[in-house]
Amino acid sequence: MPSDCIYNTRLSDAWKFIEMRCKNMWMLVFSIFAVLFIAYSVLGLALYCMQSHFVYRPAREVYYTPEDLGLDFEDVSFKTSDGVKLSGWYIPAKNSELTVLFCHGNGGNIMHRLDSINLFYELGLSCFIFDYRGYGMSESEPSEQGTYLDAMAAYRWLMDVKNVRPEDTIIFGRSLGASIAAELSSRVKAAGLVIESAFTSYVDIGRKFYPYMPVRWFVKFNYATIDYIEKVDYPVMIIHSREDELVPFVFGVELYEAANKPKKFVEISGSHNNGFLFSGEVYKNAWLQWVKFLNEYEHKADRRQVS
C-alpha cells in the first residue's frame, strides 16, 4: 500500500477518534448541566411548595399562662372581620398608662412569650398578646392577609372592649410580628411603634438564605416591612442585635433609615430569639426611656392642639 494512503488512513482514524472524544465530552457536559438543572428545579419547586411551612411554625398546645408567673390576666376570645375566632391574653399592669399590643413571631404561640409578658409587667406596661389564626387556640390556618386581619381585630378589641385610646397604645412586633405590627401601624393611630429583630421584606430574607435562587420569581409572601414603616407617622423604635443569626443587623439599619422622625435605634446583644433576655438592663432601659419619651411627646402634642 502506498505510504500516502497509509498516512491518510491514519489521519482519518485520528480525526474520527478526536470527533468521538469531543462528542463524548459534550455529552458529558450536557448531562452534568441537565442533572444540575433538574436538581435546581426540584429544589426551587420544593422551596415554593414549602414556603408556608417556613414562614409559619405554629404550636397548638398552650400549657402555661400568665397565672403561672403569678400575674392576673384575662383570657380573651374575639373575631376578625372575616369571622375567624382568635384567642389572646390581656395582662393589666398596676397604674399603667400605656398598653402594649404584642404581635409575636412565627413560631410557637402566646405561651412562648411569657418572658416578654412578665418583662412588660415589670416595666409597668399592660399587655395584650394574641395568637394569629392557626396558632394556639385560634381557629383556621395562617396566611399573610390573615395575619393582617388578625392584628387589626386585636387592635379593635383593645379600642372597643377595653376602651384603650390609640394614644395610649404601643404597637410592638418581634421578627415576623414586626412586619405585621408595621403593617397595622401604617393603617391605625397609636402612641408609637416598636419593632424588634425585623427583616425589610420576605424577598430580602429569602435572598439571604437562598442567594443562588431567583427568589423574587417564586415567593408567595410579601411582608414588606420597609414599605409599611415609611407610612407610619408617629414615633418608631427599632431594636436589633448585631449578633442576630437569622435576620441581618443591616436590615434593622435600613428600616431605621426608612422610618419617619421621631425615631430611635437600639442595638442589643444576643441571638435572634433571646436577644431581649441576653441584653438584660440595656433592653429594659431602652423601653423605660421610650415610654418616658412617648409620654413627653404626647403632652407636647396636646399642648400644640390647645394652642
Image: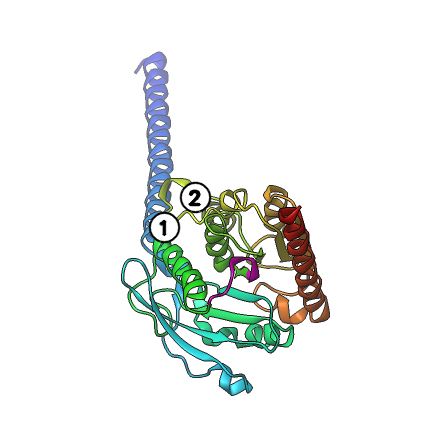
Q: Confirm whether residue 54 shows in the render.
A: no
Q: Above or below — where is 152 with respect to 70?
A: above
Give the image location of residue 8, x and y in percent.
Answer: 34, 16
Q: Confirm whether residue 222 shows in the render.
A: yes
Q: Above or below — where is 222 with respect to 239?
A: above
Q: Residues within 10 Å of mark 1 (few under 14, many from 20)?
A: few
Q: Is residue 207 left or right of residue 238?
A: left
- What residue is at 37 percent from the left and 54 percent from the top? 144
What's the amino acid at mark 1? Leu
- What residue is at 59 percent from the left and 47 percent from the top? 255
Q: Which mark is residue 278?
A: none
Residue 282 sits inside the magenta stretch = no
Real-space Cα separation, disc 2 to disc 1, in angstroms: 9 Å
Give the image location of residue 134, x and y in percent.
Answer: 33, 67
Q: Earlier in the sequence, mark 2 or mark 1?
A: 1
Give the image location of residue 183, x and y in percent.
Answer: 46, 50
Q: Which residues are magenta?
A: 163-169
Residue labelled with disc 2:
213
Task: Say which of 202 and 88 sits in front.
Answer: 88
For the image, the number of numbered tags is 2
Q: Quadrant of residue 116?
A: bottom right
Assign the N terminus to one quadrant of the image. Answer: top left
What's the amino acid at mark 2? Met
Q: Residues within 10 Å of mark 2 (few under 14, many from 20)?
A: some
Q: Above or below — where is 93 with respect to 266?
A: below
Task: Say which of 127 and 53 sits in front.
Answer: 127
Residue labelled with disc 1:
43
